[in-house]
Amino acid sequence: MINAHDSAIVRAMTRLLIPLIQLFALYVLCFGQYGPGGGFVGGVMLGTSLILGILVFGPVSRACLVAKKVTHGDGIGLIIFAGVGGLCLIGGGEFLNYANLEIPWLDTSSRRYLGILLTQIGVAVDIAVTAISIVFSLSLIDDSEESHD
Amino acid sequence: MTYVFQILLLVLLIMTAAGAIMVKDLISSVLILGFYSFLLALVWAWLGAVDVAFVEAVVGSGLATVFFLLTLFGTAPKDTHIRRVAAPPIALLGLPLLGLLLLYSAEDLPRLGDPESPASVHVSPGYLTGSLKETNTPNVVTSVLMDYRAFDTLIETAVIFTAGIACALLLRRKRQ
């Protein structure tokens, strides 16, 4: 029920904006430890860039195909987050205590820095995939693969 | 003199909040709500909560508006036009009294930025002084969210994941 937009201006602007949004999202994600932002906002912006593509280019476009592929990763972000916590358990400490990540050449504060970065990536993946998945649910685009069944 | 902008901001905030409730059409209501979220993001930034302002601008006025609009496009036009009923007199009398009561009790809240308020004497000094030394992270909000309070964030991520799964289970059916 979402159709491609007819206006050439909107399509050209969207084509220009999507990479810029994704670049800014990656910046926000990676520099969340130094400035405002972090995994949550970065994930929402990554998801929003693909949602913009779905809304403007319609359900039979490359943006929508990419988004359909992305929704297969539902839950991977949560696994990354909980997996980092599990690695801390294996390292001999408490769950999600990043000081116990067993990386020999890093001191405690660098290990916690790495733990924060990895869990932020997990949160970003989870949020982005969930946002796209909810848009597919609400817009009633059939996101199953057309090849089988 | 910068108070002029802040008063203007707060007046606009109240006007958009009232407008989102009072407007007849639900689609206009959703758009006004997006504008309200954007103004609220400016208020957060003014109060110094830049991370919250960022989230409010991206989620409140971006993603939530798209979700609301997609939901409205999936419904029939007669559902999105609301009929209003007149407010009962007890509400007209009681709600201003409740507002007065809240204003009265707001006098006892700590001032904005008060260093002696209970929120800034318990664990906050530990986070503020320890974040850079213990985690190499200058942004204290990120280190509190992702390290000191990582359990909360893990469960929040699980909640968002569950929301996506619940939407898919409720809305995606096999269509013939």
Image: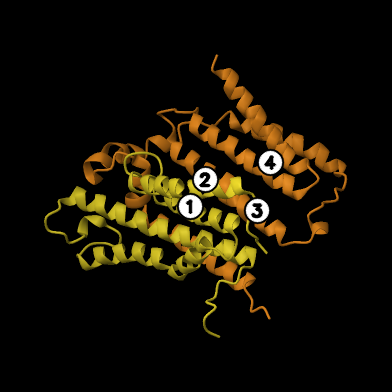
Would you say the residues marked 1 and 2 are in contact, meaning their CB atoms lie under 8 Å apart?
yes
Say what secondary structure mark 4 lies in. Answer: helix
> Which part of the image, by quadrant, shows the C terminus of chain B?
bottom right
Instruction: Give the residue drawn at x 40%, y 51%.
Output: A39
Calculate the distance from the C-alpha at mark 4 to the C-alpha at mark 3.
26 Å
Would you say the residues marked 1 and 4 are in contact, meaning their CB atoms lie under 8 Å apart?
no
Marks 2 and 4 on same chain: yes
| Chain letter for mark 4 | B
The colour with which the image depicts chain A is yellow
The image's mark for residue A44 is 1
The residue type indicated by label 4 comes to Ile
The residue labelled by disc 2 is B58
The residue type indicated by label 2 comes to Val
The image's mark for residue A6 is 3
Instruction: Give the residue drawn at x 69%, y 36%.
Output: B16
Who's orange, chain-wise?
Answer: B
